[in-house]
Amino acid sequence: MINVKRFGLHRLDPPRRGARRMSVRSLIVLVAALFAAGTAAVLFIQPASSHGTSIAQPSRHYSCWERWGSDFQNPDMATEDPMCWAAWQNDTNAMWNWNGLYREQVGGNHQAAVPDNQLCSGGQTGGTRYAALDTPGPWKTTQVNANFTFTNWDQANHGADYYRIYVTRQGYNAQTDALDWADLELVRDTGDIDPGVGRTPPTGGGTLVDIPVAAPNRTGHHVVYMIWQASHQDQTFYACSDVWFGSGQPSGDPTTTPGEPTDDPTSDDPTDEPTTGGPGNGYACAATATVNSWGSGATVTVKVANTGSQAIHNWMLHWKWASTGVTVANIWNAEHSTMGDMEMAEPAGWNQSIAVGGSIEFGFNVSGSVGGAPAFECLPS
């Protein structure tokens, strides 16, 4: 059992119960290849497994992607959906990567890892990528009753040590007040849920986990906050969902709760979204890597190709090393950053656009033993 100090708010975050189970599904697709010193090899980089988020009631980033993912350049978004518009302008990858809002190695101490006013961004995990989600304002709401079903899409069948569902207290003003822990009331703690337990989604793979919730004595705009402690490793997903209790929902907001994913972000069709739910309308990208290894390090040259039917305006690669002790020493023609043990590469600026059928290249040197290529995710926008 983990005994965690809760800063006087024990009600909000009780300690975790029970030991963590062993991993049941690897996050990384390993490419079995050995490299002799000084020998180059060309490898196709496979997409990594997806993760997930709440889809009913939809998280802010999933909701924006659901409404605008295939029409994100439409200027009407600015007036019809200003909160999503601001989030798109802040960082398009927050919506393309709607299933990747998580932190690692939190150890159950969520209030230490995620400070007040940063709950919706998971403590600004990934830097400022999800920061716009913390901004209060007229987010689109889903109408609910005092008793409703909260649904999370576990795309990779991670399972859960627990889901904790909170709802803001009556009197909280979602239009003006960034979310704090003290604004929340814990309304459901599921305990352990094994991987694969739940409903099978019509598309996209994984499992839909339905969680009955009771939140009486509330009216108007509220925020439902989810903590999903995945069981495959110490990886915690966070999400804010905007709901409306009772009548008087603002015009233009959804009047029904979306209960199923309607698109397949893991489709093999190159005109559909990539693994992490990238934009529609023919955006797709893939990558190949040439690795020159000398035992204690390697030079990796990556080619990012536009495999879709529309020009790419921006791209990002995610990957994790298959072995420990590997670090990027220097990189060229790209920008490198990390989020936990996830490595990320973004354009240098001048090479962010890729024409249909075109490609760009960047490279980096690593220190440490690289026995094979990692699994990359390519995120186009």
Image (spheres, rainbow, N blue to C red):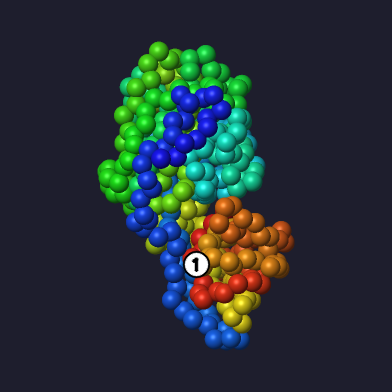
What residue is rendered at 49% in x and 43% in y?
Answer: 107
Vertical arrangement, residue 371 with respect to residue 250, above or below: below
Residue 321 is situated, as x and y percent measured from the top left of the image, at 53, 65
The amino acid at mark 1 is Ala
Vertical arrangement, residue 278 with respect to residue 353, above or below: above
Q: In which quarter of the image is residue 216?
A: top left
The residue lying toward the viewer, choosing from 258 and 134, is 134
Q: In which quarter of the image is residue 245?
A: top left
Report the residue marked by disc 1.
Answer: 322
What residue is rendered at 41% in x and 46% in y?
Answer: 230
The residue lying toward the viewer, choosing from 55 and 51, is 51
The residue lying toward the viewer, choosing from 87 and 329, is 329
Vertical arrangement, residue 296 with respect to residue 81, above or below: below
Residue 146 is situated, as x and y percent measured from the top left of the image, at 36, 19
Quadrant of the image containing the N terminus: top left
What residue is rendered at 49% in x and 81% in y?
Answer: 34
Mark 1, Cα crowd under 10 Å, few <14 / some 14-19 / many 20+, is some
Residue 288 is situated, as x and y percent measured from the top left of the image, at 54, 73
The residue lying toward the viewer, choosing from 322 and 150, is 322
- Element type at mark 1: loop
